[in-house]
Amino acid sequence: MGFLKILLFCIFCSFPLPSFQSDLETYIVQVEAPESQISTQSSSMDLESYYHSFLPKTTSISSRENEEPRMVYSYHNVMKGFAARLTTTQVKEMEKKQGFVSAEPQRILSLHTTHTPSFLGLQQNMGLWKDSNYGKGVIIGVLDTGIFPDHPSFSDVGMPPPPAKWKGFCESNFTTKCNNKLIGARSFPLTNGSPIDENGHGTHTAGTAAGAFVKGANVFGNANGTAVGVAPLAHIAIYKVCDSGGSCSDVEILAAMDAAIDDGVDILSISLGGTSNPFHNDKIALGAYSATERGILVSCSAGNSGPSQRTVANDAPWILTVGASTHDRKLKATVKLGNKEEFEGESAYHPKTSNSTFFTLFDVEKIVHEQFDAPFCVPGSLTDPAIRGKIVVCLVGGGVRRVDKGQVVKDAGGVGMILINNPEDGVTKSAEAHVLPALDVSDVDGKKILAYINSTSNPVAAITFHGTVIGDKNAPIVASFSSRGPSEASRGILKPDIIGPGVNVLAAWPTSVDNNKNTKSTFNIISGTSMSCPHLSGIAALLKSAHPNWSPAAIKSAIMTTTDTLNLAKNPILDERLIPADIFAIGAGHVNPSRANDPGLIYDTPFEDYVPYLCGLNYTNREVGKLLQGKVNCSEVKSIPEAQLNYPSFSIRLRSTPQTYTRTVTNVGNATSIYKVEIVSPKGVAVKVKPSKLNFSILNQKLTYQVTFSKTTNNSDREVGQGFLKWNSDRHSVSSPIAVVLLVE
C-alpha cells in the first residue's frame, strides 16, 4: 500500500473576507501529496506553494474575482488540503488538476446544547481524583464558542505550569487573560475574531470538563455549593469555532483540530456536530482520525435529536460518542390547581421570598383562535390585555427558547408561566433560569392542567418553589433529547458508546442570569449532550493522568467496560418514558469513573486495524485514502466486517447464518488472574464463547477469544435483542454490551 508519510508541521493561513456580495463559496479541498512533498525535509512554504498551485490562474476568472482573496486555511495534520473561497467554475477547473481528490462546500454544524462530580463518585483526596492527581499535567482542548477568561472557574491558583510539550499560545488580544489553567485561546472564524465567548456554551463546557473549585456557585440560590470541573487540575486550551448564535463551520472545526494536534493537547472535547455521514465525508470524523493516530482521545456529543432512532452523530469508532442522562438532583417546583391537583416540575427560578399565591390561569384556547402561534408564546403573540396579572400556559417549541417565552409573558403583564413539554420529552424537564416564576411540566401533566382550565369559569393556580432536592432514586434517566443509535454510518459499531450527566447541569457562565451584578462568580444551568460530553472529556483526562501510557482506545475501553447499567434504586436504567432504556439509548451504560480507573482488561484497538475496517465498509480506494491522507488499494487489504473491529461492544445484524468474531483483551489488572465468561444472550440468539476461561500470567499479556452468534427462533424483521458478555475475575468484571438486529431472509 502506498501510504503517504505525514509531514511534521502545520500551516495556518487566513485572509479577510470581502465586503461585497459575490458568487464565491467556501470549499474544503482535499488533495494528494506528490512524492516531492513526502520528504520530512519539505518546508511549510513548499506545501503552501503546492496548495496554491491548485487554485485557478487569474487569467481564467473575472476581474472582480481577481480582487477576492481565496485561500482561507491550509491544513496539514487533519488532511492534505485547504479551505478556499471559490466559484463553481473554479472548482470544475481545479478538478482537472493531477492530485485533486475532492472539493466540498462547507457545512454548518450546530452546538449540542457542581453536583455532578459527586454524583459520579469523585471525592476529594480519594479514589480516581487522588490517583490521577485531579488530572494534573493533562491538556484538554475544547472546540466551542470561546471562553470567558475572567471567570473564577478558570483561576490558576494551585495550578502547575503547562507541560514542556505544550506548543500552543493565546492570541495577542488574549495574552493577559491566560494563565496556568487557561493555557491556550485561539479563534477560527473566517472574519477577524476573539476567543471571548459571546454565547456562554463554551464557557460552560470548559468549566464542566476542567473548572477549578469555586465556592458558593448557584443560580437564584439553587444548586448552591462548590462548583468544580471533572478534572480540576487539567489545563484548558480553547479553540473558538462557533459564532455567537451557535453556528459552527466545518472549515474552522478542521482548522482548530489541525492546530490542536500541533499544540499538543491530550484530549479533544467537541460538543457540536451535524448528522451521521460516511466517515470520509464527515469532517469531525476525518479530523478525529488524525488526532487519534497522534494519541489524542476525541470525545464528542452524540447529538440532541432523540428520542428518534438512528439519529446519533459523531459515530466513528475512533470517537468516544456520549449520550445524556439525568443526575439525582432536582430543582423542584410545583403547581397547585384550584381543584387541589398538584403537579411537579423543575425550574432554576427561585424567589427571594416564598409566595404560593393563587392567580388566574390564562385560557390558551382563547389565544389560539386569534393567532395560531400564540400557544408557543412567540414574541408579539401575547397582545391580549387580559393576560395582565395571570399565569400563562405556554407550549414548548415554536422556535423560541424557554427563557425567551417567559420574557414574552412578562412583557405582556403575566405573573407566571407553566411550560408544557412535548409528548416525546416524557419525564425529561428543563430547569432554566427564568425571568419570572415559571416551571416545566410533562405533556401528560400539561394536558390535565389544560383540561382543568376548560372545566371551570375561574381556573386558578399557585406555583411553589421547593429549591434543590437531592436523592432521585430513578437517576440516571436517559434524556429524551439524547440521540439514539443504531449508527447510520456503521451499523456494526454500537453507538452511542456511553451516557453521562447532561440534564440541568450547573457550570460557569459569562454573565449573571439572576441579575446579580456584584460577582464574577456567575453560573447557569443548561441541558444537552453538549453537557455530557465534557463530563466524559474530564474523565478521560483523569484516566490519562493516572495511566499516561494508555492509548485513546484503551481509555475508551476502560470507560465502556466498567459502566453502571442499573440506577440508584438498583433497577435497569430507564428512559424518558420510565421504561427500561434500550441499548441504542445507553450504549455500554452510564459512566462509572472509579471503576474505569481499574478495568482489569482492556480492548486496545490497534490503529492499523481501521484500514481493513474502512475497506470493509465498501468505501472506494479514494474514499479510504481521504481518511488515511494517502493512497490505498483495498483489493490488497484483507478487509474485515465492521463487527470484527476490536471494539468493547458488539453490534450484530443477524440472519440465519451464524456469525463468528474475535476479540483480543489486554491484562491491566492483576498480573496473575483468571477470568471466566458470563453471557446473557439477546432474545432469540445463542451466544457461544471459546475459550470460556482466560488465564493471564503477566501484566499487559494479550489473549484472544471467539464469539459465535446464532439465531434460535423465527422472528419479525428488524427485531432488536440485547444482552451482554462479561469476563469476571476475583476482582474485576469486564462487560461488553451486545446489540443484535434480527433480519428475515
Image (tube, helix red, strand yellow):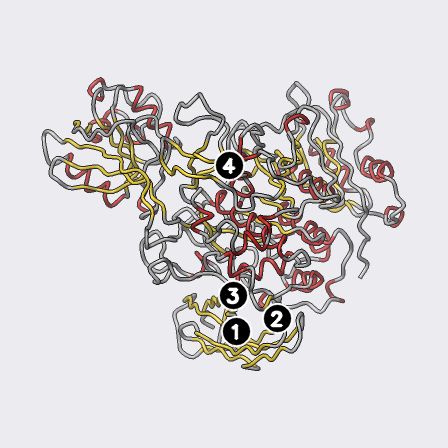
Q: Residues within 10 Å of mark 4 (few under 14, many from 20)?
A: many
Q: Amino acid at mark 1?
A: Trp
**Mark 2 vs mark 4, CA separation in Å:** 37 Å
Q: On residue 577, which mark appears?
A: none
Q: Nearer the viewer, residue 169 or 159?
A: 159
Q: Residue at label 1?
A: 727
Badge number at residue 665: 2
Q: The residue tagged with tag 4: helix, strand or loop?
A: helix
* Amino acid on which the number 2 mark rests in the picture: Val
656 w.r.t. 130: above or below: below
Q: Could you tell which of marks 3 and 1 lies nearer the N-terminus? A: 3
- Residue identified by numbered label 4: 204
Mark 2 surroundings within 10 Å by alpha-carbon count, few (fewer than 14), some (14 through 19), many (20 or more) = many
Crowding near the residue tagged with mark 1, few <14, some 14–19, many ≥20 C-alpha atoms within 10 Å: many
Residue at image coords 50%, 56%:
498
**Residue at disc 1, secondary structure:** strand
What is the C-alpha distance between the residues marked 3 and 2? 18 Å
Whether the residues at callouts 1 and 4 have beta carbons within 8 Å, the answer is: no
